[in-house]
Each structure stands twice: as structure tokens, then as C-alpha cells.
């Protein structure tokens, strides 16, 4: 925090001047308020807003598949659950044995799916547009330990590497004659043959990494300075506080008036 | 919680998060009414104790929510699972192979009771098609949504956690002795059968301090 940023940030883009905690607060507040409010109009507005923002920000091509992967199974589950079985429903549209399609059930399912879509899109829009190093720097500056930042950054970088390693272990075992059949016993044996080398190599790696981190003073106490400076302003701090207060108020209101 | 963990445990947390995802995908399929998304968390809890397990569970949810925001509300439940798994290991339930699924079953009951209201109030249902079908069955019998989801959780979670605990027991017993004994938690509390005598660790020349043990294994130029 002591280094001057003059040389490095000659022409900062608009997005870079935004403290990453501000969009985080916005995403969390949007998610909380939409869930608490439970209104069609608000959910649709949030979905439209998020889609618009992701199109403008150029993240739509990554946000949309990720959102679909979450929303399609969840949405189907909700649609089947409430669309066919909604004992509280009175307006019966169709009936097959125990399953009754009711207007109230479909309404409830639609509302929950929209609400969920709004929450998922708001949070994914944040996670796909934030600069991870900036987020980590902002968190460290706010007193969140470098340890959390390490866990976050390390997971995101390890994920593709470990998935690749798991694939290579499977190939190696297959070249040694591993055949996975439908038989559950053979499946368990195949799982063991792949999981044990994976877990073992990961634990070995972790030991090496622990030694390296220890040597670089991860466990040392005392204040830290950051090489990376993250912009912040009084306006952004005020906006964040207001957003979080609004989110808390919405949740409290919802809890106090269960019928609302 | 996080600040007190030694570096040797801290580096395991990202590994656990990735294992939750990778192994969960390997075992789970959409047609089983289980989640199997806690393998990494329970593994770290058994290797490094309840505090590490709880931290792993909570962080796992937070980091995973970067890709799937629907797991975020279950962070507290995931932390509870990690903590309970660590306590089960601490009190010797992983020393006998048949006790691990029992510990998992009990953990699952507690986890189900904690996570059901979240699923009911925040989502109004469950994320999977198979779990959704079970909830539908209870709804068809006239249960309220909360009751139906709680019953589904009490059906799915104990079995799910019993399977996860069993998988973790298979994994930790398949690890070589040297890998297991590098964890002070396992040595101190005799977590696993056959890791009983502290003299054993000394015979292998392993120092008692956690960080040294790992540092000794892998010098920076290694």
C-alpha cells in the first residue's frame, strides 16, 4: 500500500477504477433482495439487467452456459415438483392419478425459477467479470488474511490442472488394462484405482507447496503491504454500505412478515 | 479459524475443494438421489481435524459458488459436515472400518435437518432431478413443502454421507503410511488403525512439529 501506482496505471479503464468489492456488494444485495422480495416483476427486471450488463461487458458467452448448467436441472426439478404436485393448489388444469397440474403450482414454480435465474445471473455476472488478482488485493487490504486469498486463487488455478491430472491417471490405468463395466464392484475398483493415485499425488504436492509458502513467510504475523493497489473512493464505500443495509432490511422484512 | 491453521493444512484446502468437485462428478450422476460433493471436505477433516474440516466446508461452498451460486446458502451446513467428520475422526470412528459409515449416517441426519429449511425457503425445491422426484412423492401425499424437503433430506443425506465417509475411509487406508503419518492430527489422536504408537513416528525419524515434517520431505530444490 506504500508504493505509488502512477507508473503502472497510466490509463486505467473505467472498470479497473471500480473496487471489486463494489460489484460484489451489488451482486450479493441483488441476490438477497430478489430472493426476499419474491416478485415476478423484480426478478424479470434483474434477469434482463444482468443479461444486458453481461452483453455489454462481453462476458455473455461465458456467463450464459454456466448459468444454463445450473438453471436447467434446477428449473426442471422445480417445474416437475410444483407443476405436478402442489397440494395447496385449487385451480386444477389437468389430472393424472396423484399428479395434478394446478395454476397455483405453475405460478409458484415459475416465480421460483425466475427468482433463481436472477440470483444465479447476478452472482455469475460478478464472478466472470471480476479481476481475481484485484479481488484478492482488495480482500487483503480489508484485513481479510492472505490465507483466504491464497485458498481462493489456488483453487481456481488448481481446478483445470487437477482435472487434467485425473484424466491422465485414467488413461494410464486404462493402458494397464482397466476396463470399467456396469458391475458396481468393478466400478468401485475402478474408482479406487483412479482416486488413490490422484489423492496421493495431490497430498505430496501440497507438502511441497506448504514448505514453499512457509519459506516465504505465510505463517508470519504482522501487517502486510500489497504490491497491487486497488482503487476505492468514499462514494464506493457509501454505495457498498447502502447496498448491504438494503439487503439486510429486505431479509428482515421478509422474516418479520412471512405472508408478504 | 483460518488464521490458526498451519501452512501444511492450509495448502490442503484448495486440494479438497477441487476433490469435492472432481470426485463428486466422477461418482455422482444425475440419476442417483445423492450429492457426493463432500469427499474432499471429509478427507481433510479426517487428515487434519475438525477446524480444518469446517474451514474446508465453508470455503468450498464460497469458492464453488463462483461457478454455481446455488451452493452458497449451504455454506454453514458444509462447515458443519466438515466439523462433524473431524470430530468422528478425533474420537476414533475411523479406526474400525465399519464405524465410518455409521458416523457418516449420523452426520447426514444432522446435515439434512440443517440444510432442509435453506432449500425450502431460499429455493422452494432441490437442485437435482432425482431428489426433486422424492420431494414430489411426499408432496403428492399432501405434505407441506418444508416437511417434504426435510423428509427427502432425511432419506438422502444420511445415505449420502455414509457413502462419502466410506469412500474417504477407503482412500485414507489406501494411502501409504508415510503420507498418512505426515499429519500431526492423525498421529496425535490415533485416527486410523495401525497409527497407534507415538514411538512409531519417532522410529521413522519424523519430528513432532507439523510444518517440519513436510518441509523435511520436500526441500525447496526437490
Image (cartoon, coloured by chain):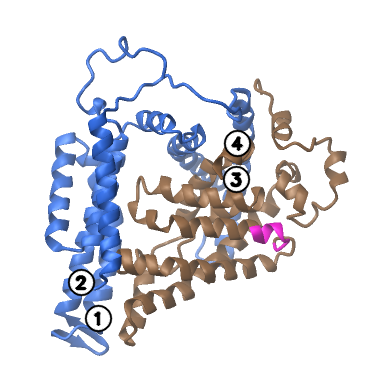
Chain colours: A blue, B brown
For image coordinates 16% across by 86% down, the residue present is: A90
Q: Chain of mark 4?
A: A
| Pointers 2 and 3 within a single chain | yes
Of the two numbered discs 1 and 4 on the same chain, state the one appearing first in sequence.
1
Closer mark to the observer between disc 3 and disc 1:
1
**Left or right placement of residue A109 versus residue B212 in this view:** left
Q: Chain of mark 1?
A: A
Q: Are marks 1 and 2 in contact (CB under 8 Å)?
A: yes
Helix, strand or loop at label 3? It is helix
Q: CA distance from mark 4 to mark 2?
A: 47 Å
Q: Are marks 4 and 2 in contact (CB under 8 Å)?
A: no
Q: Are marks 3 and 4 in contact (CB under 8 Å)?
A: no
Viewer-nearest residue: B147 or A251: A251
The numbered mark at residue A199 is 3
Position of residue B187 measured from the top left corner of the image (x, y, whole percent): 77, 48
Image quadrant where residue B126 sits: bottom left
| Pointers 1 and 4 within a single chain | yes
Viewer-nearest residue: A221 or B86: A221
Position of residue A64 measured from the top left corner of the image (x, y, whole percent): 22, 47
| Pointers 4 and 2 within a single chain | yes
* Residue at numbered disc 4: A206
* Residue at numbered disc 2: A108
**Eyeballing the image, is B104 above or below A121?**
below
- Based on the picture, tell me whether residue A90 belongs to the magenta stretch: no
For image coordinates 30% across by 69% down, the residue present is: B124
Range of the magenta residues?
B87-93
Amino acid at each position: 500500500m506504500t508504493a505509488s501506482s502512477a507508473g503502472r496505471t497510466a490509463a486505467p479503464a473505467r472498470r479497473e477504477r471500480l473496487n471489486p468489492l463494489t460489484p460484489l456488494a451489488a451482486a450479493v444485495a441483488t441476490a438477497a433482495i430478489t430472493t426476499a422480495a419474491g416478485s415476478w416483476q423484480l426478478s424479470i427486471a434483474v434477469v434482463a439487467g444482468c443479461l444486458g450488463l453481461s452483453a455489454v461487458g462481453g462476458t455473455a458467452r461465458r456467463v450464459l452456459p454456466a448459468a444454463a448448467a445450473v438453471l436447467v436441472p434446477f428449473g426442471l426439478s422445480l417445474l416437475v415438483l410444483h407443476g405436478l404436485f402442489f397440494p395447496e393448489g385449487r385451480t386444477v388444469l389437468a389430472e393424472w392419478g396423484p399428479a395434478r397440474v394446478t395454476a397455483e403450482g405453475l405460478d409458484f414454480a415459475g416465480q421460483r425459477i425466475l427468482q433463481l435465474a436472477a440470483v444465479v445471473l447476478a452472482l455469475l455476472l460478478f464472478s466472470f467479470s471480476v479481476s481475481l488478482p484485484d479481488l484478492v488485493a482488495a480482500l487483503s487490504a480489508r484485513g481479510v488474511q492472505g490465507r483466504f486469498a491464497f485458498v481462493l486463487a489456488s483453487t481456481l488455478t488448481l481446478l483445470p490442472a487437477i482435472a487434467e491430472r485425473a484424466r491422465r491417471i485414467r488413461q494410464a490405468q486404462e493402458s494397464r488394462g482397466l476396463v470399467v463395466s456396469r458391475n458396481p464392484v468393478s466400478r468401485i475398483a475402478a474408482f479406487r484405482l483412479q482416486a488413490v493415485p490422484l489423492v496421493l499425488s495431490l497430498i505430496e504436492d501440497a507438502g511441497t507447496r506448504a514448505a514453499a509458502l512457509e519459506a516465504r513467510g505465510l505463517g508470519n504475523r504482522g501487517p502486510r503491504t500489497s504490491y497491487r493497489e486497488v482503487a476505492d473512493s468514499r462514494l464506493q464505500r457509501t454505495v457498498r454500505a447502502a447496498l448491504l443495509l438494503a439487503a439486510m432490511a429486505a431479509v428482515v422484512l421478509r422474516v418479520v412478515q412471512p405472508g408478504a | 479459524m483460518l488464521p490458526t491453521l498451519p501452512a501444511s493444512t492450509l495448502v490442503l484446502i484448495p486440494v479438497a475443494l477441487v476433490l469435492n468437485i472432481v470426485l463428486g462428478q466422477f461418482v455422482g450422476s444425475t440419476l442417483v438421489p445423492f450429492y457426493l460433493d463432500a469427499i474432499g471436505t471429509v478427507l481433510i477433516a479426517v487428515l487434519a481435524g475438525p477446524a480444518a474440516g469446517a474451514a474446508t466446508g465453508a470455503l468450498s461452498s464460497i469458492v464453488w459458488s463462483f461457478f454455481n451460486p446455488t451452493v452458497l446458502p449451504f455454506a454453514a451446513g458444509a462447515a458443519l459436515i466438515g466439523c462433524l467428520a473431524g470430530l468422528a475422526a478425533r474420537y476414533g470412528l475411523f479406526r474400525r472400518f465399519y464405524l465410518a459409515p455409521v458416523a457418516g449416517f449420523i452426520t447426514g441426519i444432522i446435515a439434512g435437518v440443517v440444510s432442509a429449511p435453506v432449500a425450502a425457503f431460499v429455493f422452494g425445491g432441490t437442485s437435482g432431478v432425482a431428489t426433486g422426484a422424492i420431494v414430489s412423492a411426499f408432496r403428492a401425499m399432501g405434505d407441506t413443502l418444508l416437511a417434504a424437503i426435510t423428509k427427502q433430506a432425511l432419506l438422502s443425506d444420511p445415505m449420502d454421507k455414509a457413502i462419502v465417509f466410506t469412500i474417504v475411509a477407503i482412500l485414507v487406508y489406501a494411502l501409504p503410511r508415510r503420507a498418512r503419518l505426515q499429519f500431526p492430527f492423525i498421529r496425535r489422536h490415533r485416527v486410523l488403525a495401525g497409527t497407534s504408537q507415538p514411538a512409531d513416528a519417532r522410529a521413522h525419524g519424523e519430528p513432532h512439529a507439523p510444518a517440519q515434517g513436510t518441509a523435511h520431505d520436500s526441500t525447496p530444490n526437490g
